[in-house]
Amino acid sequence: MKTGKIITAAAGVFCLGLSCPNPVPGQHAVLSEIMDTQEAMVAIIAENIQVGASVRGPVLDPRSGRVGIIRNVQQASYRRAGAGMIIHPSGIIVTNAHTVNRANRITVQLHNKLEMPAEVIRLVHNLDMAFLRVHTPAPLTSVPLADSDQTRLGDQVLTIGNSPLLKQTVSGGIIIGLGRNRTATRHGQTQNDLFQTTINLYEGDSGGPLFNTDGGLIGLMTAKETGADHSSFAIPANQILGHLIKYLKETNAKK
């Protein structure tokens, strides 16, 4: 497996490229562990086809005698891209609500490039979190969630990029805000109980993983701080786990 070169900087740890052979001693195992989670990372394409109409004018129906309006029907397709993580082997994926909300077609691309349709099974708007489900004949590789309550201010964190600019590149920063006292606004929604990091988030990176330096998944990237560079928010892993357990209990109760 290829690894990356880690560069220690004041702002945190950065891994640039995936073929550099000489990581800093003591960090090779962490990087390898993080790269192994790529099988649980997915790319998401959400499309929303809206039908609009432009009025051409009134017309008389000779059979009914009623006046109607002839319209030109037009279709407009909206496409959003993001990332997500498989968090249950049955095919449950966590991503951002803003990526998939109101989409009428969602496609998930697995690590092996296999594409399949997905359905939204739960939306948690105040966390900008959504659960998707894909149906596969065999269990999928899922990523275990770490105890995000152990995260502290100043902790170093890492993420794998999914944007065209930083796809499959590991980069990092530090925690500058803890969940219980951080909020953000995105797409008109107030998001509460988030981690704030110094990682710069690019379009397509939201829904990607946030790791601690032990290689544990402590959060899911969700939004860039408006008007600020190198600052972004992440949903804590314990929030994700709590909603996952609740969903699984509700699903099992219906069986």
Image (cartoon, rainbow, N blue to C red):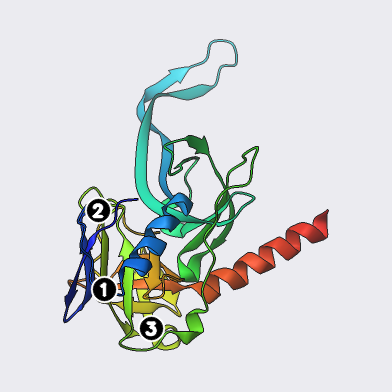
* Residue beneath the point at 41% across and 40% down: 47
* Quarter-of-image position of residue 186: bottom left
Residue at the outermost top position: 62
How far from the left and from the top, in percent, is residue 200?
23, 67
Q: For the residue marked with disc 2, what is the amino acid?
A: Leu
How far from the left and from the top, in percent, is residue 55?
36, 29
Sequence order check, earlier mark of 1 and 3 = 1
Q: Secondary structure at mark 2?
A: loop
Relative height, residue 48 to residue 23 (above, below): above
* Residue beneath the point at 50% across and 66% down: 125
Q: Which residue is mark 1?
A: 25
Mark 2 and mark 1: span between their CA atoms?
A: 17 Å
Sequence order check, earlier mark of 2 and 1 = 2
Q: How many residues crowd around disc 1 within 10 Å: few (fewer than 14), some, or many (20 or more)?
A: few
Relative height, residue 170 to residue 238 (above, below): above
Judged left or right of residue 199, residue 222 is: right
Q: For the residue marked with disc 1, what is the amino acid?
A: Pro
* Residue beneath the point at 61% across and 68% down: 243
State yes or no: discs 3 and 2 in contact (Cβ < 8 Å).
Answer: no
Mark 1 and mark 3: span between their CA atoms?
A: 34 Å
Mark 3 and mark 2: span between their CA atoms?
A: 33 Å
Q: Which residue is mark 2?
A: 18
Sequence order check, earlier mark of 3 and 2 = 2
- Total labels: the figure holds 3
Q: Which mark is residue 182?
A: 3
* Quarter-of-image position of residue 88: bottom right
* Residue beneath the point at 54% across and 69% down: 240
Residue nearer the viewer, 68 or 147: 147
Query: Could one spot residue 156 in this view of the protein?
Result: yes
State yes or no: discs 1 and 3 in contact (Cβ < 8 Å).
Answer: no
Q: Secondary structure at mark 3?
A: loop
How far from the left and from the top, in percent, is residue 194?
41, 78
